[in-house]
Amino acid sequence: MKPFTWNLVVAGISEALATMRSRPLRALLASLAMAAAVAATAVVQTTLDGLAREARATSARAFGSDSFVIAKVATSTLSRRELAQKLERNPHITRADVRFLDTVAGTRVMYAATSQRTADVVAGGRRFENATISGTQATLFEIRDVGVENGRPFTRTEETSAAPVIVVGRGIVDALFPAGDPLGATVRIGNRAFRIVGIQAQQGTAGGASLDRYVWMPLMAFERTFGPVGTLQVFAKAYDVSRTTAAEDRARASMRARRHLSPGAPDTFDLITPEASRGFVAAITERLGAAGPPIALMALLAAIVVVTNTTLVSVTQRTHEIGVRRALGAPRISVLLETMAESSVIAIVGGAIGVLIAAAVVAAASGRVGVPLALEWPTLAGSLAAAAVAGVAAGWYPARRAASLNVITALRQE
């Protein structure tokens, strides 16, 4: 067999292009099969990447990226018996506990006590049912990125005076004020009037629950509306985020001191760190990412079968031509490279078409699915590389078959 040279590769590509031009419809149909596979692969991967990014962003909005939480019970992996034991053992977290935490925090940690319940929000003749009402402190807007898009958060003065002011989620605004400007408008919650001073930007969902149905009000106003709370949840954050671990240790030590717990005694409260929410999101994104390769593999296998069949048909129809070329001195490797070049060019052209289709689909879907989508360069390059590899794989068997044709038998074929 003649040794491999780049001249043979160039000649093989030239012959492959000539063959494709002589039968354009067959080459086009095979390219479209590869285009469909590449487009499906790119769209699925782009969607999964978008969902993973949205999950991380939503987690940061819902739980805070550098904040941590102190609660009576905040662990979701307990059995019923363990949960009952914790509920019995752990005392409520009270306003006095939060004042103690503030007193010993110094300039290391900021805290925001929060309590939640559901209630209807009424504006004129419109009603938004089962909104999530959060009574909290003004420092929460420093601890968490609540995302106030219009207006402002309530202030510490409004907090301490139990002012009837609220920040509302986008879902509530759209339902109660579909055409008007809600800033400064009055709504009723629990038979009390509240003035809207801030509006959240669109937040999306977290764990299947909408983040756009929240109402934030001063904690004292919350207590005047719904009565004394049983237990509080306390959001906390280090003033210097590089010292988050030290702030967590400070908060735990402060709570243990407040509860007069001896060394070695278990905590009578839960402290949930950012790593807990990050771990949850990492598990979600890992599962989302795991779905991509099997889908891509199945789509590419189907395309490989189509391109392989198309190339086999080409070899069969050109059997006599191949026999003539071999009789005139063409080496086997040139026949092999020509056949593999044909399948590779078909696959690469199909891959390029597929990427263009994927870009159009992603651009059309991005504004409609509620998740920002963008066809990124790694996905684009990976899709084209996958198409090229699939083309080589599809052409391997037909190329071997063409190169191994018996010259005399091939010359007898018409």
Image (cartoon, rainbow, N blue to C red):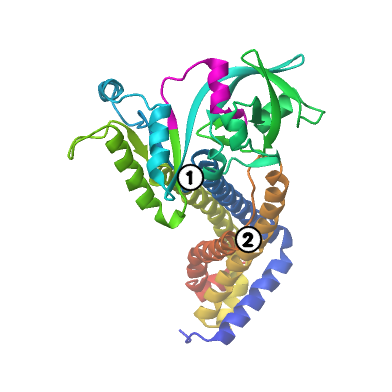
What amino acid type is highlighted by mark number 2?
Answer: Gly
Q: How far apart are the alpha carbons under marks 2 and 1?
A: 24 Å
Can residue 55 be seen at all in this image of the molecule? Answer: no
- The residue closer to the viewer here, 73 or 313, is 73
| Residue furthest right as drawn | 179
Q: Which residue is labeled 1 in the image?
A: 288
Point 63% across, 35% down: residue: 154
Crowding at dot 2, Cα within 10 Å, few <14 / some 14-19 / many 20+, comes out as many
What amino acid type is highlighted by mark number 1?
Answer: Leu
Q: Is residue 275 above or below residue 5?
A: above
**Residues at discs 2 and 1 in contact (Cβ within 8 Å):** no
Point 30% across, 34% down: residue: 258
Point 42% across, 45% down: residue: 274
Residue extent of the magenta highlight? 212-233
Q: Which residue is labeled 2 in the image?
A: 351
Residue 395: x and y in percent read: 53, 65
Residue 237: x and y in percent read: 45, 46
